[in-house]
Image: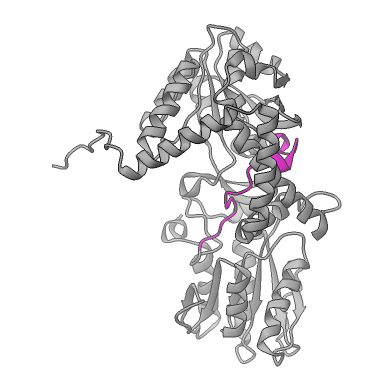
C-alpha cells in the first residue's frame, strides 16, 4: 500500500533566504520612486535585455511572426524587429511596475487604471452568477487585483496560481493577496475550489494563453494549431458561470486599461481562444511573448501527445506549421512520406530543398520547391536556411533531412531549430534518426512516427 504524499512545507534553504533578502531590498528601493519613474526605469532595463539576450530575441521574434502571420499585409522583417524591441521595452516596464504596484494601496493604484466594458462583468455578478475571466499574461498584471474590488465589498474572486519555489516569497505573495481580499487556488485545489467559488457568484481569472500539453484541446491559436486549455469552458459548463475576456494594456506612462468583452454562452474552447486572441490584439507588444507557446517536440515535431490525433483540428488552422525537407535522389519512394504528412497534418507547408534533379513532386500548393545548390560550400548553408525561413511570414519549425546532409543539420542547429531529423544518423546535432525505409509503406510509417503516438494510432 503506497503512502500518501507528504504535503508538509519544506523549510527554506540558505539560497531561498538570500534571494528573499535581495528581493525585499529591491522592493524597498522601488518604494522610493513613483510609479511613473519605475515605469521609465523598467523600459530602460527592457531595452538592455533586448540588447544582451539574442536567444530571447529569437524566441520573441518567432512568436510574433506566428501571431501576426494573418495580418493583411503581414509585417515585414523590419516591422517585426521593431515590435520585438517594443515587446522587450514594455515587458521591462510591466514587470517592474507590477512589483511597484504591489507596494501601493488600492486607493493609490486606482488612480492609475481605467476600465472598459465593466458592465459585462458587473451584470452577471449582480445577478448572483459566477464569472470566468479568460485572460493572457499581458500588461501590469498586478492591477488585476483591482478588478474584483470595483464590483463592491461583498464580491469574491481570485486567480488560480502556481506556488513559487521559494517558500518565503510564496508566503509573502499569499499574505498580500489575502489581505487584498483575494481567494487563491493552488495546484492542490484542483477543479473543485474554483468551481465552488463560481457557484457562489465569485470571479475566477484563468490565464489561458500558455501551452496545455497533452491535457489540452487542439485548436488554432492565432491561426496556428496548438494545445489550448479547456479549463474556462469546463468551469463555465459545470457551474453555469458566464465568461468574459480581459486585456490589460498601457495607455500612458504609469496608466493601464482593463478591457472586458463578453464570450457567448456555451462557447467551446476554439471560440473562447478566438475571443482571447481579440483581447491580446488590443496591444500585442504588451503580451509576455517569452513563453515558447508553439514549441514542438524534438522527436515527434508534429505530435501534440493529446488523446486525439491532430488531423481534423489541423484542417481549421489558417497559419501553417513549416518544415524544410531534403529528398534522397536515389529513393523515389521518399515522396510518399510527404504525401502522408499532408494527409495527417493538412496545415503543413513543406519547403523541399531542390538541387534540380528531384523526382516529380505532388501538385500541391503546400509543397514548395526551394532552389538549393548541393555543391555549394558548407558555410553557405546558413544563408540558405535563413532565406528559406524568410520566404514566408511564418518561421521554419524544423528540418527533415531525408538525405541526411550533416552540413544542413549543423546549419539548422546554428539557426536554433528545435528538431533536426535524418536517416541512419547519430550524435549531435541530430535529434532523431530513422532507419532507411525499404518501400513506400515504410516511408508512410516514417511520416506517421512524426505525427502519431501509439494511443492516437489506435484511436
* Colour mapping: one colour
Left or right, 406 with respect to 435, comes to: right
User: Vertically, is 379 above or below 431?
Assistant: below
Residue occupying the point 42% across, 29% down: 191
Magenta stretch prevailing secondary structure: loop
Give residue 69's position: percent from left, percent from top.
76, 53
- Report the number of discs: 0
Residue occupying the point 86% across, 52% down: 73
Residue occupying the point 27% across, 37% down: 10
Which range is magenta?
A: 277-297
Left or right, 210 with respect to 161, comes to: right
Q: Toward the viewer: 140 or 423?
A: 140
Give residue 344's position: percent from left, percent from top.
59, 62
Q: Toward the viewer: 29 or 200?
A: 29
Give residue 369's position: percent from left, percent from top.
76, 77
Q: Toward the viewer: 211 or 54?
A: 54
Left or right, 103 with respect to 5, comes to: right
Q: Toward the viewer: 315 or 181?
A: 181
The quarter of the displayed image where residue 399 is located? bottom right
Give residue 190's position: percent from left, percent from top.
39, 31
User: Vertically, is 120 above or below 307?
Assistant: above
Residue occupying the point 66% across, 11% down: 123
From where the camera sits, is residue 177 visible?
yes
> Quick check: is 159 in the magenta stretch?
no
Quadrant containing the N terminus in the rendered view = top left
The quarter of the displayed image where residue 16 is located? top left
Q: Which residue lies furthest to the right in this view?
A: 73
User: Vertically, is 272 above or below 110?
Assistant: below
From where the camera sits, is residue 232 visible?
no
Amino acid at each position: 500500500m503506497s503512502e500518501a504524499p507528504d504535503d508538509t512545507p519544506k523549510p527554506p534553504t540558505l539560497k531561498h533566504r538570500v534571494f528573499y533578502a535581495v528581493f525585499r531590498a529591491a522592493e524597498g528601493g522601488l518604494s522610493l520612486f513613483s510609479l511613473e519613474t519605475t515605469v521609465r526605469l523598467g523600459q530602460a532595463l527592457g531595452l538592455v535585455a533586448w540588447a544582451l539576450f539574442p536567444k530571447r530575441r529569437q524566441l520573441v521574434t518567432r512568436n510574433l511572426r506566428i501571431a501576426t502571420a494573418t495580418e493583411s499585409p503581414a509585417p515585414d522583417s523590419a516591422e517585426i524587429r521593431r515590435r520585438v524591441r517594443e515587446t522587450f521595452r514594455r515587458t521591462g516596464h510591466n514587470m517592474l511596475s507590477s512589483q511597484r504596484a504591489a507596494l501601493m494601496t488600492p486607493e493609490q493604484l486606482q488612480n492609475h487604471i481605467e476600465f472598459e466594458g465593466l458592465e459585462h462583468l458587473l451584470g452577471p455578478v449582480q445577478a448572483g452568477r459566477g464569472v470566468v475571466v479568460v485572460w493572457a499574461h499581458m500588461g501590469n498584471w498586478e492591477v488585476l487585483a483591482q478588478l474584483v474590488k470595483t464590483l463592491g465589498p461583498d464580491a469574491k474572486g481570485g486567480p488560480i496560481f502556481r506556488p513559487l519555489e521559494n517558500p518565503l516569497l510564496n508566503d509573502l505573495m499569499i499574505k498580500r493577496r489575502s489581505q487584498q481580499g483575494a481567494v487563491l487556488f493552488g495546484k492542490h485545489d484542483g477543479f473543485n475550489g474554483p468551481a465552488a467559488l463560481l457557484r457562489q457568484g465569485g470571479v475566477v481569472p484563468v490565464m489561458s494563453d500558455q501551452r496545455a500539453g497533452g491535457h489540452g484541446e487542439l485548436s488554432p491559436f492565432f491561426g496556428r494549431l496548438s494545445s489550448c486549455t479547456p479549463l474556462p469552458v469546463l468551469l463555465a459548463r459545470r457551474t453555469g458561470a458566464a465568461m468574459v475576456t480581459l486585456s490589460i494594456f498601457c495607455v500612458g506612462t504609469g496608466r493601464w486599461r482593463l478591457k472586458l468583452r463578453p464570450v457567448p454562452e456555451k462557447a467551446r474552447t476554439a471560440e473562447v481562444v478566438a475571443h482571447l486572441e481579440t483581447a491580446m490584439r488590443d496591444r500585442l507588444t504588451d503580451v509576455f511573448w517569452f513563453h515558447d507557446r508553439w514549441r514542438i517536440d524534438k522527436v515527434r515535431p508534429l505530435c501534440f501527445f493529446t488523446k486525439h490525433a491532430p488531423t481534423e483540428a489541423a484542417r481549421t488552422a489558417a497559419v501553417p506549421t513549416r518544415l524544410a525537407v531534403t529528398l534522397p535522389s536515389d529513393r523515389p519512394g521518399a515522396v510518399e512520406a510527404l504525401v502522408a504528412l499532408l494527409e495527417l497534418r493538412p496545415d503543413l507547408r513543406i519547403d523541399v530543398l531542390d538541387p534540380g534533379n528531384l523526382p516529380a513532386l505532388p501538385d500541391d500548393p503546400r509543397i514548395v520547391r526551394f532552389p538549393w545548390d548541393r555543391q555549394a560550400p558548407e558555410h553557405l548553408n546558413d544563408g540558405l536556411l535563413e532565406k528559406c525561413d524568410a520566404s514566408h511570414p511564418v518561421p521554419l519549425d524544423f528540418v527533415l533531412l531525408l538525405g541526411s546532409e550533416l552540413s544542413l543539420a549543423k546549419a539548422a542547429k546554428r539557426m536554433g531549430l528545435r528538431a533536426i531529423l535524418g536517416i541512419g544518423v547519430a550524435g549531435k546535432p541530430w535529434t532523431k534518426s530513422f532507419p532507411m525505409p525499404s518501400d513506400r509503406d515504410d516511408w508512410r510509417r516514417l511520416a506517421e512516427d512524426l505525427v502519431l503516438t501509439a494511443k492516437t494510432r489506435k484511436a
